[in-house]
Image: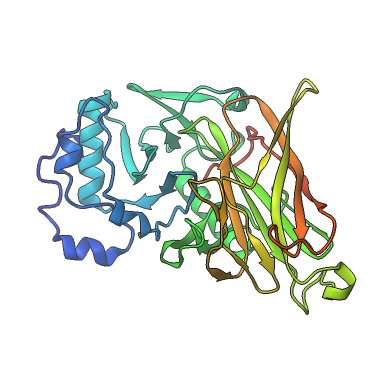
């Protein structure tokens, strides 16, 4: 009865903020800003929250876009459901059960009449032609389980699939805003399985994958680069590969369309980054305002580049990255191309959405 009563103006009164924080899967309990939001009606966390990345539904970042989906405790279920009923005409049969608040809002709603679990709000795009949209007031939503799944158990099916992907290494605990170690959470860029590709060229390993972000009507993609270390598959001694270090110089992307066409993208660096790879890590070199490339700090592990594919109708992504042996300042050989294998930019009717 309380959930159907409309907007709650004191949503956190029933549970102290400290208790909500202990749950670990929560959003800011102070919803005054949300309940009195401006014309857009959406709430954005202060920047200090961007490192709170422990949402059970996982997350990702690309450019300045950040998402981390959290299950909501009951007071916030009531608050956000009432808020959307008032602001967006949400019908009474829907409850908001999970949410994230960053540059683009992402909500998970349960349809109490059908048992459907729905993700939104979405923007129209050719990528969604295979999936049926659901209207909920002013919101457009998508069912998160395959179209062939029996109705009435969506939340359980979705959580079971999430568990399988975590157990199978498809999703790993890693920084959602790499390389910041404070942002570790369940990363939704696949690291195994059919959506994940990998190859090694002259000792440099490239892995890549993408995920669909319906709230932005585009795919986010992740490309990871590392100089393969001794003991790892694909390792070559420095004498055999021809260099101790190698630095990223230029990129060439090919985004293929369903009609056979392709968009070509060429440029220097990746979003202003020119990582210098060595075994075990990389140096965080970046282009400065002057246009010069400045030396950064040495980092351990894998260099990660995350971006957006754009709002076109591309169905796959591939390309190559040119590296200079040694460094850009002190080349130790001829520039060479490292392959980025083709990976899909597709979301079918029988796929789960995360």
Q: Position of residue 173 (x, y in %)?
A: 52, 64
223 with respect to 40 (left or right):
right
Q: In the rendered image, which quarter is residue 245 located in? A: bottom right
Q: Nearer the viewer, residue 226 or 119?
A: 226
Locate the N terminus by quadrant. Answer: top left
Q: Position of residue 38 (x, y in %)?
A: 20, 29
Is residue 142 something that shows in the picture? yes
| Residue at x-position 78% and y-position 79% | 231
247 with respect to 303 (left or right):
right
| Residue at x-position 16% and y-position 50% | 30
| Residue at x-position 68% and y-position 60% | 329
223 with respect to 205 (left or right):
left
Q: In the rendered image, which quarter is residue 251 located in? A: top right
**Number of numbered discs on residues:** 0
Q: Nearer the viewer, residue 273 or 139?
A: 273
- Residue at the outermost right position: 240
Q: How is the image coloured?
A: rainbow
- Residue at the outermost bottom position: 231
234 with respect to 268 (left or right):
right
Q: Position of residue 50 (x, y in %)?
A: 35, 54
Is residue 153 something that shows in the picture? no
| Residue at x-position 17% and y-position 40% | 33
Q: Position of residue 7 (x, y in %)?
A: 15, 35
Vertical position of residue 164 compared to residue 158: above or below: below
Q: Nearer the viewer, residue 307 or 148?
A: 307
């Amino acid at each position: 009865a309380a959930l159907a009563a409309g907007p709650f103006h004191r949503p956190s009164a029933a549970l102290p903020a400290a208790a909500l924080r202990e749950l670990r899967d929560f959003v800011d309990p102070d919803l005054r800003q949300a309940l009195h939001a401006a014309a857009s009606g959406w709430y954005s966390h202060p920047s200090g929250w961007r490192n709170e990345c422990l949402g059970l539904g996982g997350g990702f970042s690309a450019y300045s876009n950040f998402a981390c989906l959290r299950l909501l405790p009951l007071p916030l279920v009531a608050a956000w459901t009432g808020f959307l009923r008032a602001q967006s005409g949400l019908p009474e049969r829907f409850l908001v059960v999970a949410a994230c608040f960053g540059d683009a809002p992402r909500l998970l709603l349960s349809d109490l009449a059908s048992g459907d679990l729905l993700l939104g709000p979405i923007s129209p795009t050719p990528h969604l032609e295979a999936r049926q949209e659901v209207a909920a007031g002013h919101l457009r939503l998508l069912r998160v389980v395959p179209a062939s799944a029996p109705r009435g158990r969506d939340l359980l099916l979705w959580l079971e699939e999430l568990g399988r992907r975590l157990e199978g290494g498809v999703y790993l605990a890693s920084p959602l805003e790499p390389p910041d170690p404070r942002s570790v959470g369940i990363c939704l860029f696949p690291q195994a399985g059919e959506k994940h590709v990998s190859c090694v060229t002259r000792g440099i390993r490239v892995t890549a994958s993408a995920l669909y972000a319906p709230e932005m009507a585009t795919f986010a993609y992740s490309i990871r680069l590392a100089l393969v270390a001794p003991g790892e598959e694909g390792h070559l001694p420095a004498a055999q590969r021809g260099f101790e270090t190698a630095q990223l110089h230029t990129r060439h992307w090919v985004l293929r369309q369903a009609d056979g066409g392709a968009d070509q993208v060429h440029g220097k660096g990746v979003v202003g980054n020119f990582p210098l790879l060595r075994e075990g890590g990389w140096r965080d070199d970046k282009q400065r305002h002057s246009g010069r490339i400045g030396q950064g700090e040495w980092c351990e592990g894998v260099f990660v580049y995350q971006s957006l594919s754009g709002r076109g109708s591309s169905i796959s992504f591939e390309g190559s990255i040119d590296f200079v042996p040694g460094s850009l300042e002190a080349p130790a050989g001829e520039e060479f191309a490292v392959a980025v294998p083709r990976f899909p930019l597709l979301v079918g009717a029988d796929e789960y959405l995360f």
